Image: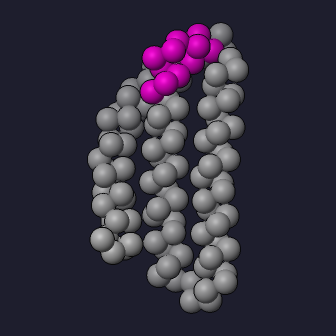
Amino acid sequence: MISATTKWIFLKTSSLIMVPFMVWFLLNFVALYDKDYYEIVEFFTNQFNSIIFCAFIIITFFYSALSISEIFEDYITNEKTRKFANLMVFLSSLIIPTITIFTVYKL
């Protein structure tokens, strides 16, 4: 299969998977909006909520990295610059969710 086709399939699949996670996140964000610190910590110490939140973060960063790399391929003509930009996006899409997951589980 062509690389562009594989990327397109991953992009569409991750966007479909992200929809129920986004609904869950928005409903819980509205519920947590007026809560104090201890209630928010209690929410994230619930194992179900922390697993769902971590999956949401991973899928969102995966989707974002794929989307941004497509933009780079369309608008950055210099090959070295494009590869560097894609590398930075890839690294940030690994580092930021990892830090977030460790922070959530450290609560």
The answer to whether 82 is drawn above or below residue 47 in the figure is below
Provide residue 41's location: percent of width, then percent of height: 63, 15
Task: Specify the quadrant of the image occupied by residue 4.
Answer: bottom left
Task: Judge from the rendering whether residue 82 lies leftward or rightward of residue 31; answer left or right.
Answer: right
Q: Is residue 36 visible?
A: no
In the rendered image, the quadrant that contains the N terminus is bottom left
The answer to whether 93 is drawn above or below residue 103 in the figure is below
91 drawn magenta: no
In the rendered image, the quadrant that contains the C terminus is top right
The answer to whether 100 is drawn above or below residue 10 in the figure is above
Seen as rendered, the residue at the extreme front is 1
Q: Is residue 59 visible?
A: yes
The answer to whether 94 is drawn above or below residue 9 in the figure is above
Provide residue 80's location: percent of width, then percent of height: 67, 84
Provide residue 18's location: percent of width, then percent of height: 37, 43
Task: Judge from the rendering whether residue 71 lies leftward or rightward of residue 11; answer left or right.
Answer: right
Q: Which residue is rendered at x = 45% and y = 44% of the image?
A: 59
Q: Between residues 36 and 92, which one lies in front from this camera angle? A: 92
46 drawn magenta: yes
Q: Which residues are magenta?
A: 41-52
Q: Which residue is rendered at x = 67% and y = 64% of the image?
A: 88
Q: Which residue is rendered at x = 52% and y = 59% of the image?
A: 65
Q: Between residues 30 and 44, which one lies in front from this camera angle? A: 44
Provide residue 105's location: percent of width, then percent of height: 64, 22
